[in-house]
Image (tube, rainbow, N blue to C red):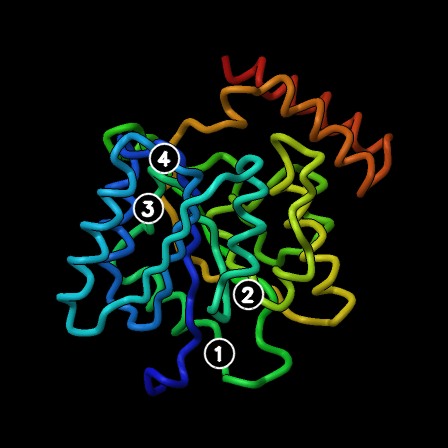
Amino acid sequence: MSAEQMPVITIATVTYNAVATLERTLKSVAAQDYPRVEHLIVDGRSTDGTLSLVQSYVEKNMGRAVPHTIRLISEHDDGLYDAMNKALQMAAGDYIVFLNAGDCLHEPTTLSQMVDGMEWQRGRAVNPAVVYGETDLVDDAGHFVRHRRLHTPEHLSWKSFRQGMLVCHQSFYVRIDLARAEQYDLSFRFSADYDWCIRVMKRAERRRLPLHNTHLILTDYLNEGMTTRNHRRSLMERLRLMAHHYGWPSAIGMHLWFVVRAVVKR
């Protein structure tokens, strides 16, 4: 497949005063050997050196044999999910994934391996709606902590998420037409990504589009985030979301299991 026939992968990174963790993410994207990368950085008017770091990243990128496309917007937003909605509208790629500051692509060949296995053809209506894979957790220094406890199912569907977010958001690549059709719901503070993934997969099912399992570790995920820091409130919000998509009996049953599982692991 020639470079012009390959899908463009948009990696969207939402930042706000993220200078302490962003460099690792930028280096991870810069190291990709895949030639068709758009890195979209949506910043909320950082004041800590984030923008200077991004500018240095842009300058280094220009020295690449095949530069990635890097675009930066820095303006006020109404929080994480509002910034992610901006990224959906700005993205020029065929697929989009959200990679937070501190998160990394697993290895320099991650995108190349992913695209090689997905049987994508430009203009084909039945190209995969979602391309997904596994996730490793890392600490603040980028060192491996453990594999994510929730493993991706062999055959993913929206019903799979009845058991929780089995695929990490950062390892969930969505075809841009479906991604744009389902905006993040700003009424949710902690779990709008969970809701968005389910709605994307429901739309894919209605259109009879495949969800492709890469069988790859796609992401090294920083083991601390907004949801982790607000675990109790996040669980309550997710309970409401699960009830909306799967019904109250299923939602209550699964959350009781989450509590039991957490106690057993202590």
Mark-to-mark CA distance, 2 and 3: 21 Å
Q: Which residue is mark 2?
A: 212
Q: On the image, numbered disc 1 is attached to which residue?
A: 119
Tell me the CA gap for discs 1 and 4.
40 Å
Are the residues tagged 2 and 1 within 8 Å (C-beta)?
yes
Q: Residue at x 54, y 47 (%)?
A: 84
Amino acid at circle 1: Glu
Q: Nearer the viewer, residue 88 or 9?
A: 88
| Between 81 and 137, the one nearer to me in the picture | 81
Q: Secondary structure at mark 3?
A: strand
Q: Quadrant of the N terminus?
A: bottom left
Nearer the camera: disc 4 or disc 3: 4
Q: Nearer the viewer, mark 1 or mark 4?
A: 4
Sooner in the amino-acid sequence: mark 4 or mark 3: 4
Left or right relative to 190: residue 185:
right
Q: Position of residue 5 (x, y in %)?
A: 41, 85
Q: Residues within 10 Å of mark 4 (few under 14, many from 20)?
A: some
- If you read the primary sequence from the N terminus, does the residue marked by circle 2 or circle 4 appear first? 4
Residue 128 spot, x, y in % from top left: 58, 71
- Tag 2: amino acid: His
User: Label 4 vs label 3: CA separation?
Assistant: 21 Å
Number of numbered discs on residues: 4
Residue 9 occupies which quadrant of the picture?
bottom left
Residue sitting at the far left: 63
Which residue is denoted by mark 4 in the rendering? 46
Structural distance between the alpha carbons of marks 1 and 3: 24 Å
Q: Secondary structure at mark 1?
A: loop
